[in-house]
Image (cartoon, rainbow, N blue to C red):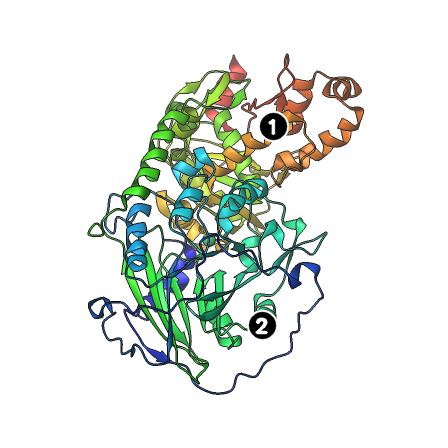
Amino acid sequence: MGAGCSRGCASTEAAQTQAVVKVKPSAAEAEEPAPWAPAKKADEDETPAAPADAPAATLVVPRKPSEAPKGESTVYGGSSRKLTILHFNDVYNIEEQAREPKGGAARLCAKVNEFRESGANPLVLFSGDCYNPSLMSTITLGKQMVPVLNKLNVNVACIGNHDFDYGLENLQKLNGQCNFPWLMANVLERDTDFPYAGAGTIWVEDWNGIKVGIVGLVEEEWLETLGAVNVDEMVYKDFIEVGREAARRMKAKGAELLIALTHMREPNDRKLAAEVPEFHLVLGGHDHHYVSAFIEPHNNLMVKSGTDFRDMSLIEVELMAGNSDPKMSVERIIIDGSVPEDPAMKEIVDEYMKLMGEKMDEEIGESLEPLDGRFQTVRNRESNLGNFVADVWRKSANAEIAILNSGSLRSDMIHPPGVLKAKDFVSILPMIDNTSVLECTGAQVVAALENGVSQWPKLEGRFPQVSGLKFKFDPSKPPGSRIVPGSVYLWEFESEPEPLDMDRRYRVAVKEYLAQGKDGFNVFLDCKVLVDGESGVILPSTIKCHFIQLRVLNKWDEKKIYTRSLTARWLKKVKSVKSLDNLAAAESRFQRTSTQYYQQRSHGLAVPHPDQGYYCIAPRVEGRIVNVLEEVVEDLE
Ligand SMILES: [Zn+2]
């Protein structure tokens, strides 16, 4: 469970509603002037093109009475107009899961089709997060979601944080292949003021004779945590202000039903509903729990629809003649094993499952050094594989220190120098681990390290691999006092190690699992959470992104590298050197062999191949973790 869930789950599950009917208060909605109203070229004609299959306005054929949600008192017929909305968010695994509710794209699709076949002509809305994380996405970079969402006939989507996990280019490529618009109105490109990531801002369309207006809104909190895009290129605008302005523009375009499609935490969704009464509906993602509630004081409806193709919301809207306040009801639909699978969607899922097998032989990068992933190494001493993973991960998480429990490294073998294949990568990091960034004092860091070495020489998964840090431990001492006093140093790349200050607070990246106090890391429970698991970077994805960056670098193309990992900062330097036009010239300028030079500068994260010149990895053991007993032995030798 994510830290975010602990904020919202307990209190909101109680608010879960199976079916409710609401009549909006008829108090006049005062239209507020927009505090945020810069004249932006992108804003006037930003409404994305209608989906290819958008039907002309039609009359609603009511669902059969047996299908009506329990407790619903909607009166069909007469002069009312009706709209069915299907909403879902945060989907990761297209295949069904072992435990109920099994979910899976094929079942959700069958459910969507059920409403479509009943004549409801549903408006299908998605609140973001699909291109990552999943094991499949570490191989495909999220490509499988394009045919899946297209097959679901999604009409409009809002961008989520994990959609950026493999970089801006990847997101834009995939979004471009979707046959529906992706919205995100309150993040702009710094240079141009256009919406960031090529997103749309609002969508206004006639649906079943009701003019529907939708705006995509996100929160600032997760933007700051993105590991694979450059946040400096974005300008964030307050979602309340942008929401108000968007509502005004959508009303000006004739919209009668206003929807905020969002990717933010529940308290922010509630705030949006409370402060922007123009929105009849706030349909959110980012949280993975199911919740629906009418929000005071305006009684607008907020819904968040669970996660992972296991939940969907059915929202019925009815506009009565002569009354601009829609009557709305919501029903949670659980996608369990009793829901049949749609055969066409099942085919897509099966195809990708097969592709996963085939892709395992794909080359993802190259190492000049053997990578030692043996349990007898990673759970016992510093390992070059541990250094590499911890370094890349720490930089992506934008932390000063990373403490990786070695149980995360699963391959238990030495990977020989040379090409690394997808199957090597998956064997090293088969788990889709979320990252938390904690604020820890130096003393808390030491306490965590004490726990890490407490079981030595047992090959326990809590033994740490570290980045941004070096320390000595003495296993002859009792557990809890093995870290040699004064031996712990903060060690930012390219600078001299400095003693860890016991009172200073540091940004420490750990797996969410550790942040929850598992594996004896109780100390982390006392640390302030700066970035929670759901917002944090995904461990294997950061490593995959690193290899993608090396590949881009190898092409020497002029494309920007969208990253703030070590490579990005370091590449800038290389790029400035690149004014000398080629790597050989750069090398001669520094009068060193390239490998030595880059080895030192990059800790082996990006080192030119000595013969071919293209970039490889070459991590080494650097003395970050020193066992003083072994140190003595080495001295004697
Ligand atoms: Zn999210």
Q: Position of residue 367 (x, y in %)?
A: 53, 20
Question: For the point 44% across and 28% down, which residue is it?
Answer: 425
Instruction: Return the residue at label 2.
Output: 244
Say which amino acid is labelled 1.
Answer: His
The quadrant in which residue 519 appears is top left
Q: Does residue 543 sit above or below 184 in this rendering?
A: above
Say which amino acid is labelled 2.
Answer: Arg
Instruction: Return the residue at label 1.
Output: 603
Other-residue count near label 1 (Cα within 10 Å), few / some / many at <14 / 14–19 / ≥20: many
Residue 502, disc:
none
Q: Position of residue 495 (x, y in %)?
A: 68, 35
Indicate left or right for 307 with 551 as reference.
Answer: left
Q: Does residue 168 sit above or below 5 in this rendering?
A: above
Question: For the point 79% across and 28% down, which residue is it?
Answer: 579
Q: Does residue 404 sit above or below 304 in this rendering?
A: above
The quadrant in which residue 188 appears is bottom right
Q: Secondary structure at mark 1?
A: loop
Question: For the point 39% across and 45% down, which residue is it?
Answer: 148
